Image (cartoon, rainbow, N blue to C red):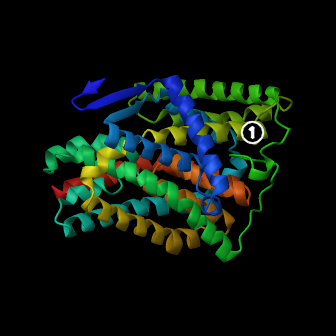
Amino acid sequence: MTDGATTTFLVPEFMAVTAGIIVFLLGMRINKRIGFLRRYNIPEPVTGGLLAAGAALVAYVVFGLEIKFELGARDAMLVYFFTAIGLNARISDLLTGGRPLAIMLVLTLGFIVVQDGVGILAATSLGQPAAMGILAGSASLIGGHGTAIAWAPEIAASHNLPNALEIGMACATLGLVIASLIGGPIAQYLISHNNLSSTAQDDEPVVGLPHDDEDNDGINHVNLMVAILVLHIAIIIGYAANEALLAAGFKLPLFVTCLLSAIVLSNTVPRFLPHIRWPARTRALALLSDFTLSLFLAMSLMSMQLWTIAGLAGPLLVILTLQTLAAVAFIFFVLFPLMGRDYQAAVLSAGFGGFAMGATPTAIANMTAVTKSHGPAPMAFIILPLVSAFFVDITNAVVIKALLDWLA
């Protein structure tokens, strides 16, 4: 496809998945060779994905070739991953973790207000419309691309910001990059500075096998088949529930209902059928979780069109720099102390860095990289998805609407 001097090349879905696997393996090889990346827990798909996005930028600038990917399979990987997270959830753990879950929720909701406040103050100080600060705040950072797309038309029409969509997409894209890079170093500092270590059982992996255990022969084709079957059953139930909620006027992301259906199944089926082979917290399910998350993130980052944000630099870079500093300060001085200053708090700090500036999958990838190196933190993988994927979207929408009405 050709548009003036630019030629568009569309990579079909099958080839996009293949490219995602190659990008991940490339990132893994680079991380093994570069100690800095490994030491600061930069996820392998982030390393490979950013390199691939940079190569696509060169192809666009030098050769006028715009590379696009069909990403339907990528979105399916997200559903698989969060369903696996749900299968690992135990009600007993959730009850035990009720207090940290509540604290994490309150802190996250408070940070939405902080993020929008930083954005508005920075935008107005730079002589930009105040609404631009919301787009460079929770609408695109905590909210991600989907929230930015949803609010851009209203902001463009009501706040004299015709390029609202471009601003939102640019902030969400740059935020994803920042989120992928800050979580690991934050956790590494907190763990080493406070001499923290995991207290969870190593034989119950939640996401990802440890780096020194990747060749473990306890995984076989039967265990994988059972895990995939249970995942599919949970996804089917989650899809049906999602359709029912949609018909009733409630719209939730598909991965949220699949996560919840998996939690219900994992806390009922083994009780009533104790002799059934259930894949929760097995190495087979951890392997599938690792695969789907790695592929999702590799495909997300390699498909970023970095050239689309080149013309929106300047004020946006200043605002996002301030947002990054605000997020890091919030983690160090508020979140980590209030979450208990323990190993789980350090892992959640890595996740919060990924979520506050990027997206839930980025947060999970940050936490996975940390736990692969330092040991499991099962509750962190339950707390963060419940907060970031379930509670925050509704609150974020309320805050954005209230601020836009106030600025009108």
In the image, residue 48 lies at what x, y percent? 55, 46
Q: Is residue 256 above or below residue 35?
A: above
* Label 1: element kind: loop
Number of on-image labels: 1
Q: Residue at x 72, y 34 (%)?
A: 268
Res. 148 image quadrant: top left
Residue 341 appears in the picture as rendered: no
Whether residue 194 sits left or right of residue 408 in the image: it is right
The quarter of the picture where the C terminus appears is bottom left
**Residue ID at (65%, 24%):** 233
Q: Is residue 343 left or right of residue 4?
A: right
Q: Nearer the viewer, residue 250 or 48?
A: 48
Residue 89 visible in image: yes
Residue 134 pos. (x, y %) = 28, 56
Name the outermost residue toward the left: 160
Disc 1 packing (10 Å; few <14; some 14–19; many ≥20):
many
Q: Is residue 193 above or below residue 40?
A: below
14 or 93, which is in the foreground? Answer: 14
Q: Which residue lies under the disc numbered 1?
A: 280
In the image: residue 65, left or right of residue 24: left
Q: Nearer the viewer, residue 22 or 224?
A: 22
> Residue 258: x percent and y percent?
57, 33
| Residue 261, position as x, y percentages in the image | 61, 33
